[in-house]
Amino acid sequence: MLNYFENNNNMLALTGAEAAAEAMKQIEPGVVPIYPITPQTPIIEKFAAYVAKGKVNSELITAESEHSVMSAAIGAAAAGSRAMTATSSVGLALMYEMLNIASGMRLPIVMNVANRALSAPINIHCDHSDTMGVRESGWIQIYCETAQEAYDNTILAVKLAEHKKVLLPVIVTQDGFITSHLMEKVETVADDKVRKFVGNYHYPYSLFDSSKKLTFGSLMLPNYFFEAKVAQFQAMENARKIYKQVAADWETIAGRKCSEIENYLVDNKTEAVIITMSAGAGTAKELAKELNDRGYKVGVVKIKLFRPFPYEELRATIKNIDNIAVLDRTLSFGSIPPLYSEVVQTLSMETRRHPTSKEQNRKQKIQSYVFGLGGRDLREKDVEGVYADLLSNKFSSETKFLNLNIQ
C-alpha cells in the first residue's frame, strides 16, 4: 500500500477533514476565520498547519465564537477577499443570523461543515440536523459521501459561488467522524491546475473599490425588500445551470463526475430504489450490489446537490420506479423529514405538469425512513429490511425508524 502511494504523486491517504483542508490549501483563500468545534476541528487544524509552515498565504483569524467567524467572513468577502471557513452543529446554529446576512448580501463564502447532531441532549456524533436546520438560509448545499467528494466539492464550490450569475455562499458537508475522521484514498489535482480552475478572485462589488458607490447592510423597507429577495431566489435558480457547467469543467480536469445526483444500479428494470445522502449511501450501495448479485433488481440514488434541489434530474431517474424509500438522517418535528419532502414534491410536480399522462398518473409508492440520529449505525440488515419492505409492498403513511432500540 505504501509503495502505491509513493508511486502515484496525485494519490494521498487522507481523512475527509484532511481532504477538505488540502483543497483549501490549493485554493489559497485570502481570509479564513476559524473557531474549533468537534468534529470539524481537524479541517481547520490541518489548514492552520499549512499556514504556519508557509505552504499557503492566507490570513487566519482566530475569532471568539462561530457568530464572529461568520461576521469576519462577511467583512472579508464584502471587502473583496476570497473567504472560507468550517464549522459543525451548534457552531452552525450560532451562525444562523449571519448566514442569512451572507446570502442576502450575495457574498460567495465557502464553508465546510462536518455534520453533527444539534443539542439537546449533547451529542458530538453525526446526523444532518445542523445543515438541514439552515436549509432555507439561502446557501447552496452540497453533500459528500466520501473524502474524495469532500475534496472535489470544496474546489467546485468556490467556482460555483463566485460565478457572476450566482454570487451565493456554499456549504459543503461531510458526515462527522464517519467521513471526517476516516482515512481513504483521495486523488488530488496539481496545485497549478486547481488555481487555474478557480481563477483569481474578483468580487465585483468590493467595498474597497472607490470607483463605485456601494452600500452594504442597509435598511430596506417594503419598497425594495421584495425585489432583493426575488433577485436572490433567481440567483439560486441560476445555480442549477451553472452547477452543471462547473461540474463539467471540473470533470475535464479531474476525470471525475460531480453530478447533482448519483445513480447506482438504477435502470429501466429496477423494481425498488433507496434515495439518501452522504455516507449512508455507501452502506445502501453495498447492500444493493449484494442483492443484485442474488437476482433482485434494486438500486440507490444519492442526492449530492440539496440546494438548489435537482427536481428534474431526480424525476428523470425515478419516473419508471414504483417502489421508493427515502432515508433521512434527521427529523422535521411536526412535519415529514426534509429529503422525503423534496422527493414527494418531485413526484407531485411532474403529475401537475402532465395531469392527463397515464405514465405520470401511475401510482408510485414512497416510504419515509429515518436513520442514524446522533451517530447511530446504519447496518446492512437495516437496508435489507428497507428493500424487503419495498418488494413486499409494506408501505405506511408514517415514518419508519431504523435501528431504533425502543419500538
Image (cartoon, grey):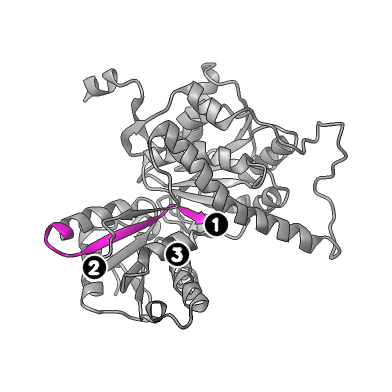
Which mark lies nearer to you, 1 or 2? 1
Single out the residue that lies furthest toward the front: 357
Q: Label 1 amino acid? A: Pro
Instruction: Please name whichever residue, 355 or 236, is drawn nearer the observer in this view of the structure.
Output: 355
**Residue at image mark 1:** 308
Residue 359, labelled with which disc?
Answer: none
Q: Position of residue 38 (x, y in %)?
A: 46, 43
Left or right of 333? Residue 400 is left
Left or right of 108? Residue 51 is left
Which badge, 2 or 3, comes first in the chain's sequence? Answer: 3
In three-dimensional space, the C-alpha distance between marks 2 and 3, rounded to whole angstroms, equals 18 Å
Q: Position of residue 114 (x, y in %)?
A: 46, 45
Which badge, 1 or 3, comes first in the chain's sequence? Answer: 1
- For the C terminus, the quadrant is bottom left
Residue at (57%, 42%) from the top-left corner? 160
Instruction: Please indicate, yes or no, whether residue 399 appears anywhere in the rendered image.
Output: yes
Residue at (58%, 54%) from the top-left corner? 93
**Residue at image mark 2:** 387
In three-dimensional space, the C-alpha distance between marks 1 and 2, rounded to whole angstroms, equals 28 Å
In three-dimensional space, the C-alpha distance between marks 1 and 3, rounded to whole angstroms, equals 12 Å
Q: Label 2 amino acid? A: Tyr
Single out the residue that lies furthest toward the bottom: 356
**Residue at image mark 3:** 339
Which badge, 1 or 2, comes first in the chain's sequence? Answer: 1
Left or right of 54? Residue 204 is right
* The magenta stretch spans residue 215: no
User: What's drawn in magenta, residue-wise?
Assistant: 292-308
- Mark 3 is surrounded, within 10 Å at the Cα level, by few (under 14), some (14 to 19) or many (20 or more) other residues, namely many
| The quarter of the displayed image where residue 214 is located | top right
| The quarter of the displayed image where residue 395 is located | bottom left
Q: Position of residue 379 (x, y in %)?
A: 24, 58
Q: Label 3 amino acid? A: Leu
